[in-house]
Image (spheres, rainbow, N blue to C red):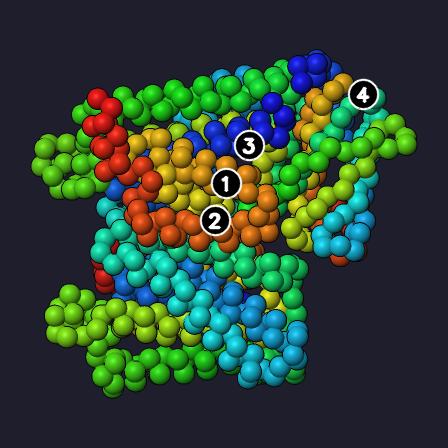
Amino acid sequence: MLSLLAFPATGQRVSAEMNCTFTGTDFVYDCVIRLTPATPGVQISVGADMPSMPMAHNIRPVKAKPGKRPGEYHATLDLDMTGEWAVKLRLSGALRDLLVLHYEFTESGTAPRK
Amino acid sequence: MDEYALGVLTNIGLFSFVALSAYLLLLAGELSFGQQAFFGVGAYGAGIATAMLGLSLPLAILIAMLLGALAAALVGLPTLRLRGLYFAMATLAAAEMFRILFELLHWQVLVEGEPVGPDGTQGFRGIRWIFERGVEAEGFLAMVWTLLAAVLLLFFLVERSKLGATIRALGEDPALVGALGIDVDRFKLGIAAAAGALAALGGALFAHHNTYIEPRNFDIMLGVHSLAYALIGGLGTALGPLLGVVFDLGFLEASRVLQEYRMIVFGGLVALLLAWRPRGMLDERVVHWLKARFS
Amino acid sequence: MALLADLVQNTLDGIALGSTYALLALGFTLIFGVLRRANLAYGPAIMFGAYAATWASLNFQAGLLVLAVVAVSATVFAGAYVERLCFAPHRKGAAAAAMVASFALWMQLEELAMLAMPRHLYPFPALYEGGPLSLGPFSLRVEALAMLLAAIAVCLFLWKLLYATRFGIAVRAVIDDPRAAGLAGIDVPRIFMLVFALASAIGGIAGFLVAASQEQVTPMLGMWSTLKGMLAMMLGGLGSLPGAVLGGLALGLLEAHAHWFLGPQLRDFAAYLLLFALLALRPPWMNTRSAS
């Protein structure tokens, strides 16, 4: 754990985008996350809670697996229910940051909240 | 320690502040459904201070506490003569008004070319002071718990003092306190302001831990939860609310095995617990007994 | 002239909305009047009832009348559960504990309903398939009329019950002074239970009507019912049944007008501001009962 005391690249802001598909099992989603800019050496831990009741509905964070392309990660999220979730991407390693993205999870997939 | 456990421990610390805020008012005999408003005022205030005005976190926390105290006094002043459910509903109404004001707050400034600031229901992103300073999760946890320890120490000192006795007397018999020559109104207002500042402190830290806050974070759920923590943990000592928070957040996390039935089990446990101990786990009797045994 | 038309239309809408709030407030007030406690699990019990009816509708395609019965029964069942667990054990003092316990059961009931039916929205059969009625330039939804009629019917029923039956005399005696009522030989705990059931039944009716007129149920129904019911109850003066009805109607009218002229957020703000101002100023009608 102490080895992860890397210094963050201060001043460099990343953004992330996520696309999920519904696996058919309630309520498991396969998600692909893309970081911009695609920085190597970054680990992502994905958590989610419901904005309206964060205490009662949250999932245990999962570590995202790096995908084929740089900046791409895969994670499987097992949610309590459909609806709007605040997805928290905790970046560690080469970059330290916490990104919060809102998505509407439905039976067909996800769409960013607007 | 793994990142997740750090997160849980930090959350326990953060929510203890708002639970202690509700506890303080309970001691003075008032049920408040509205402490979440001051938690929110602290969060928005501190977030604006660091992310938009470029101030340091310690200064932001002080500003947040001041704003929390002011907001609490603003709510406390018209409601001084209210008791019981009337007071509780007034605090609920006030807290919801604050939440709606957060929803209506649109104020952003450009920071490094990006707009930063509260954007109504879209929330307030980019409160990244601790990330920009390279503060690690452990460091932040230590900061939260140090501040909490200081607050608890303050509570312990007050409980042993005349001030503490007066507060509890206010809860039991306000007429008596008045008869002792104390200006009950001024005193109550002071307690309310202190409770507001306490909740705001928690809110300021919460905003920086999450980097993102939105009005929904400060809704009635949080308010009633804080009250519940204080009551379940016990009104005998300031450790009571802390115990309540640990019971909820700790239980919630530990029982992922039960996963789906968490709330059902927890809700039932709480009702049963309160039926058995109406003033919480660490109520006055238990605390007296403990003190007698260990002194 | 257009302004007048808006005002009239809003008033019509407001009365309809207010009828729902009146029903909710009546339920809350019955419980408060008799037990001197606020029941935070009231809304969730209603949601439980509405969800039970939805479940029956989805699985058995039951007719509206059956669904109404299911909704009311389920609400009464949930209410009895809450009464036994939260209010029966805390007879003397410990009002805060009773209320927080009811909050715990709020969480529990909501979770139970959401576990059984986790989607964010479920369809509910419509109360009335046709369109709204036209009264000249104004429109009135038939569902709204039904709500108003239901509220009036419940009021009349309660009036009869409380003033023309022995049960009613007992209830009023308990409302006035539980200890004296007990000394006079009235089985006070039994009255508590029966009033709770009555309040739950009224809530169940309200829940069914809301689901049927909106043609959907969502998990927010629990919080919404509790909040609106308590707001209306307090506006009309805590513990007064006629006050509950007036408070409900007043809230409905305020919301309808505020929504039209100010938008949804300021509408809610206006309602809360009104309540806060009334509590701060404490006009005479608000002190009907001491609140613990």
Q: Quadrant of the N terminus of chain B?
A: top right
Q: CA distance from mark 4 to mark 2?
A: 41 Å
Q: Are marks 1 and 2 in contact (CB under 8 Å)?
A: yes
Label annotation for residue B266: 2
Q: Which residue is mark 4?
A: A41
Q: Are marks 1 and 3 on the same chain?
A: yes
Image coords of residue C96 (percent x, y): 31, 50
Q: State how far apart marks 1 and 4 are (Cα).
A: 35 Å
**Mark 3 in CB contact with mark 4 (< 8 angstroms):** no
Per the image, the residue denoted by label 1 is B251
Mark nearest the camera among 4 and 2 is: 2
Q: CA distance from mark 1 to mark 3?
A: 11 Å
Asked if badge 3 and badge 4 are on a common chain, one would say: no
Given the image, on which type of amino acid does mark 3 rest?
A: Val
Q: Earlier in the sequence, mark 1 or mark 3?
A: 3
Chain for disc number 2: B
> In this view of the protein, can residue A67 be seen by the observer?
yes
Label 3: few (<14), some (14–19) or many (≥20) C-alpha neighbours in 10 Å: some
Which structural element holds mark 2? Answer: helix
Chain under callout 4: A
**Which label was assigned to residue C60?**
none
Q: Secondary structure at mark 1?
A: helix
> Which amino acid, mark 2?
Phe
To which quarter of the image does residue C162 belong? bottom left
Q: Residue furthest right?
A: A68
- Disc marking residue B8: 3
